[in-house]
Amino acid sequence: MAPPRLGDDGLAHRPCLQSGARAPVRALGDQYRLLRRADQPVAALEAIQGPQDDAEAMRRSFLERRDLIVGLLNRVPGVTCRMPGGAFYAWPNVTKRAE
């Protein structure tokens, strides 16, 4: 397949893409351009460089919830659940419970 090329509208197109199929891609591009605002980079920079107290509080809250749910799952007969290392979700193993 040929590599994509940049079209007149600034979007990447593959030669195999028929012109009728480009309309939805263009519409998405138009929506993206409409949703971008000039103050977004400033807000992102402030979020990264500003105080992180709220982010730390949310992290602790997620860890507490993770610890609670993993602990409760491991108390269910036939269910095992490993403590995720870097996440706040749980993937319980219920194969023994289903037997």
Image (cartoon, rainbow, N blue to C red):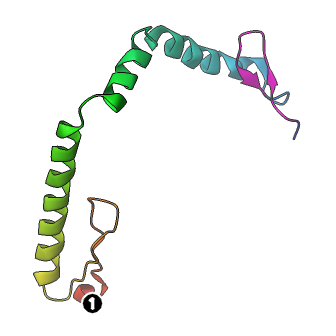
- Check disc 1 and report its element: helix, strand or loop: helix
Going by the image, does 42 lie left or right of 3?
left
Q: Main secondary structure of the magenta part?
A: loop
**Location of residue 4 in the rendering, given as x and y in whole percent from the top left corner:** 81, 30
Along the line of sight, the residue nearer the viewer: 5 or 43: 43
On screen, residue 53 above or below 27 = below
Q: Quadrant of the N terminus?
A: top right
Pointer 1 local density, CA inside 10 Å: few below 14, some 14–19, many at least 20: few
- Quadrant of res 73: bottom left
* Three-letter code for the amino acid on which mark 1 is drawn: Lys
Residue in view at x 11 percent, y 67 percent: 68
Q: So how many labels did they put on this image?
A: 1
**Location of residue 85 in the rendering, given as x and y in whole percent from the top left corner:** 34, 68
The magenta-colored residue range is 3-13
Residue tagged 1? 96
- Quadrant of res 9: top right
Along the line of sight, the residue nearer the viewer: 27 or 99: 27
Residue in view at x 72 percent, y 18 percent: 20
